[in-house]
Amino acid sequence: MAIEDRRGGSLSGLTEQEAKEFHGIFMTSFILFTVIAIVAHILVWMWRPWLPGPNGYASLDGVTDAVNYATAGGITDAVSYVKSLVA
């Protein structure tokens, strides 16, 4: 019985038309996934490069710069500047 159920001698059991339809859907999905992955990798690279610059990863750390700016009176200078613009 199992031998009689095989369609067209295909190992997958699909007809030629079904195989072409599956292949088209598979290729479209694969290309879409690949494009999304490439865009995601580019965005992550722009946010945080995987290879450090000449000063190492410390040159990429914006938090250290922000803390230094805040503790050095940069925020109070900025607030007073904004107040002078408003007044």
Image (cartoon, rainbow, N blue to C red):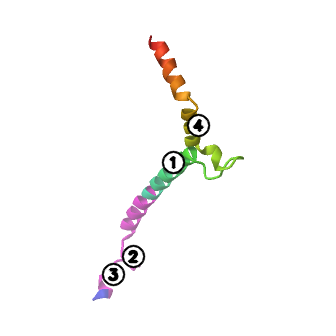
Circles 1 and 2, Cβ within 8 Å, touching? The answer is: no
Residue closest to the eye, 3 or 84: 84
Disc 4 residue type? Asn
Residue pushed farthest bottom? 1
Q: Residues within 10 Å of mark 4 (few under 14, many from 20)?
A: few
Which numbered disc covers residue 12?
2
Alpha carbon distance from label 2 to label 4: 64 Å
Point out the stretch of residues depicted in magenta.
3-28
Query: Is 72 located above or below residue 41 in the figure?
Result: above
Residue at image location 42% in from the left, 61% down from the top: 26
Name the residue tied to disc 4. 68
Element at label 3: loop
Amino acid type, label 3: Arg
| Quadrant where the N terminus is found in the figure | bottom left
Left or right of 86 on screen, residue 62: right
- Nearer the N terminus, badge 2 or badge 4? 2
Give the distance between the C-alpha atoms of the residues marked 3 and 1, in whole angstroms.
43 Å
**Residue 63, magenta (yes or no):** no
- Residue 47 or 16: which is nearer the viewer? 47
State the residue at coordinates (36%, 72%): 14
Point out the frontmost of discs 4 and 1. 4
Which residue ends up furthest to the left in the rendered image? Answer: 1
Can you give x and y, in whole percent of width and height, for residue 10 in the image?
40, 77
